[in-house]
Image: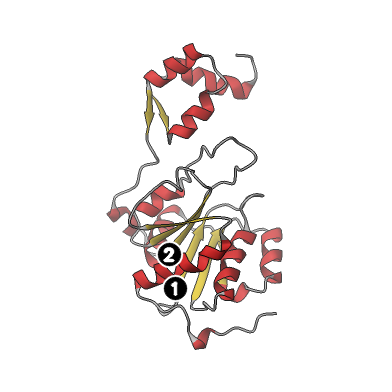
Amino acid sequence: IDDNSFNVCEVIPFLYADELIFTNQYQMDYMLERFDEDIKSMVKKKAVISQHPTLPANMYNIEKSFYKISEEEINIAYFGNFYDTRGFRQIELVAKELYDSNINNFKIHVFTNLNKKTMRFYKQSDFKEYIEMNQYAPYFEFLNLTNLMDVLLIFDAETEGIKPYNPYVPSKLSDYRGSTSKIWAFTEKNSVLDLTVEDNIYTVHQRDYYKYCKVFTKIANDIGKPLYNADNIKCLN
């Protein structure tokens, strides 16, 4: 224990909180691994493992969104920040893998922190015809938008080669769980998200690109929409 401010911000709650909430076992193990057994034991006695809470269904209708979609297409949405390890390239890769598998009846609606770098990637993309870029939506409109879509994309944080295991659970998962839409999860092997088994979640390892089509085909069959539409043929660069 030293006087590093980040260190102190962790140590004080560990010592004095009556209850400590961790989103998953991996997170608790990762945050405690640098401490001695006395501190680990103390923390574990007052620790609760609990993922982010999911709001009741009526909260998804507080604010109605007037965002326009085509009901004929399979509408996929991504909500969230872009980072160095997760950005437009991941969205573009999904579009590319689907298009290369002769799937064209889809549109990916992205709601993120638009900036010059992101928009440059978008404008240069060969698959921009299948992607709609949007600024963030306010929280309650975002909840309503999740019900408007067919499929919601969620990505694990990439930790392979950086951390011994993935200690994160994407917080968007809790919001998505309250939606009526399907959840398409791109995971790291043996992460919490990867090991989550629920009827509404369809999982594929992020780097198993050849499996994207297979998983998406199952989703399309389950929602009853065709994968191909002659009217959606685009002239890509």
Whether residue 233 is visible here, answered yes or no, is yes
Q: Is residue 129 above or below residue 28?
A: below
Q: Please name the amino acid that badge 2 sits on.
A: Val
Q: Please name the amino acid that badge 1 sits on.
A: Ile
Which of the image's four quarters has the N terminus? top right
Q: Are marks 2 and 1 in contact (CB under 8 Å)?
A: yes
Helix, strand or loop for disc 2 = strand
Residue 164 is left or right of residue 44, and the answer is: right
Q: Residues within 10 Å of mark 2 (few under 14, many from 20)?
A: many
Q: Who comes first in sequence, dot 2 or dot 1?
A: 1
User: Residue at point 51% right, 72% down?
Assistant: 107
Can you name the residue that lies furthest to the bottom here? 230
Number of numbered discs present? 2
Q: Is residue 73 above or below residue 6?
A: below
Where residue 118 appears, x then y in whole percent? Answer: 67, 60
Whether residue 68 is visible here, answered yes or no, is no
Q: Is residue 204 above or below residue 34?
A: below
Where residue 31 appears, x then y in whole percent? Answer: 53, 27
Helix, strand or loop for disc 1 = strand
Can you name the residue that lies furthest to the top here? 38
Q: Toward the viewer: 12 or 50?
A: 50
Q: Which label sits on residue 151?
A: 2
Q: Is residue 63 above or below residue 98?
A: above
User: Residue at point 46% right, 48% down?
Assistant: 194
Q: Toward the viewer: 121 or 141?
A: 121
Q: Residues within 10 Å of mark 1 (few under 14, many from 20)?
A: many
Which of the image's four quarters has the C terminus? bottom right
Where residue 133 appears, x then y in whole percent? Answer: 58, 66
Colouring:
secondary structure
Residue 18 is left or right of residue 84, and the answer is: left
Q: Which label sits on residue 74?
A: 1
